[in-house]
């Protein structure tokens, strides 16, 4: 791996990968997808992950999101080694420490905007007044306070993604994961969503974003490039070009 610069973010490490590996059974043997990944993301960083189809981005994202476990090495999230946790423990880590933003929004059509954002707090057992206040505040911060009672089918793609970002932030996660967050948006809405991510970054949020779009990657301060399950570059986008 080539490292053109040292990253000097002031925050403590939020995400650390140490010799991370992932294998899957294949016939009578195994297929290794991730090969000894090492990476550190500190509090307040905005990191992009790029690479061709089959490079290992999705497998890595599933591990970062505690949806899967590595078969070798270690993954530290907010100082805790989560590599060997069981399913119940991983679910608790996901709910408390990770916010997800998906390309397809993943909003529940039968719930209003406010109810969609409230859902993680509802599962945590937060009192109704606390849920309502926190969610109204977040929806105002993403420019959606005027659509609290609307339903996802009544929103544009850009509005749906803003609601999804508010929902991802509602539990104050240590890490925000975004998987192709502009992939289903037109250029105007995509630009607005990226402006929102840049604002979240400026406010100190720690964000890891997977993207195949070179225009999006060019806007990020740090980009990791993957190839055949390895990190081959870790640099500013101008260096990757």
Image (cartoon, rainbow, N blue to C red):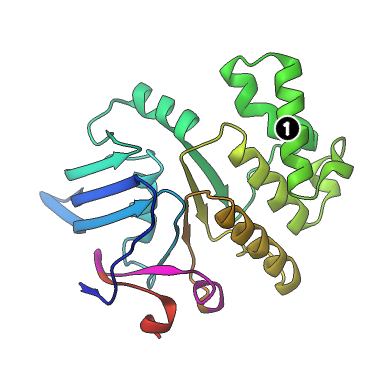
The correct choice, above or below, for 213 with respect to 67 in the image is below
| The magenta stretch spans residue 220 | yes
Q: Which one is in front, 199 or 28?
A: 199
Q: Is residue 199 visible?
A: yes
Boundaries of the magenta span: 215-231
Query: In the figure, is residue 67 to the left or right of 227?
Result: right
> Which of the 4 image quarters holds residue 14?
top left
The correct choice, above or below, for 240 with respect to 198 in the image is below
Which residue position holds label 1?
A: 135
Could you tell me residue 138's position as x and y percent?
A: 71, 39
Could you tell me residue 39's position as x and y percent?
A: 27, 57
> Which of the 4 image quarters holds residue 85?
top left
| The magenta stretch spans residue 116 | no
> Which of the 4 image quarters holds residue 63?
top left
The correct choice, above or below, for 217 with respect to 129 in the image is below
Query: In the figure, is residue 167 to the left or right of 61?
Result: right
Within-10-Å neighbours for mark 1: few <14, some 14–19, many 20+: many
């Amino acid at each position: 791996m080539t490292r053109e610069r040292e990253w000097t973010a002031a925050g403590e490490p939020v995400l650390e990968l140490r010799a991370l590996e992932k294998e899957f059974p294949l016939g009578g043997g195994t297929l290794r997808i991730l090969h000894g990944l090492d990476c550190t993301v500190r509090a307040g960083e905005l990191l992009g992950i790029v690479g061709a189809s089959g490079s290992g981005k999705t497998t890595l994202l599933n591990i970062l999101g505690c949806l899967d476990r590595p078969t070798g090495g270690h993954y530290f999230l907010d100082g805790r080694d989560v590599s060997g946790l069981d399913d119940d423990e991983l679910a608790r880590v996901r709910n408390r420490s990770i916010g997800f933003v998906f390309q397809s929004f993943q909003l529940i059509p039968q719930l209003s905007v406010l109810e969609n954002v409230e859902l993680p707090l509802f599962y945590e057992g937060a009192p109704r007044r606390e849920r309502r206040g926190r969610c109204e505040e977040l929806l105002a911060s993403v420019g959606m306070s005027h659509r609290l009672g609307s339903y996802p089918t009544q929103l544009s793609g850009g509005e749906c993604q803003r609601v999804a970002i508010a929902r991802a932030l509602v539990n104050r996660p240590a890490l925000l994961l975004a998987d192709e967050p502009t992939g289903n948006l037109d250029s105007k809405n995509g630009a607005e969503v990226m402006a929102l991510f840049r604002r979240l970054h400026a406010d100190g949020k720690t964000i890891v974003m997977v993207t195949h779009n070179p225009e999006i990657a060019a806007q990020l301060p740090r980009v990791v490039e993957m190839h055949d399950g390895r990190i081959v570059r870790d640099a500013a986008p101008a260096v990757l070009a």
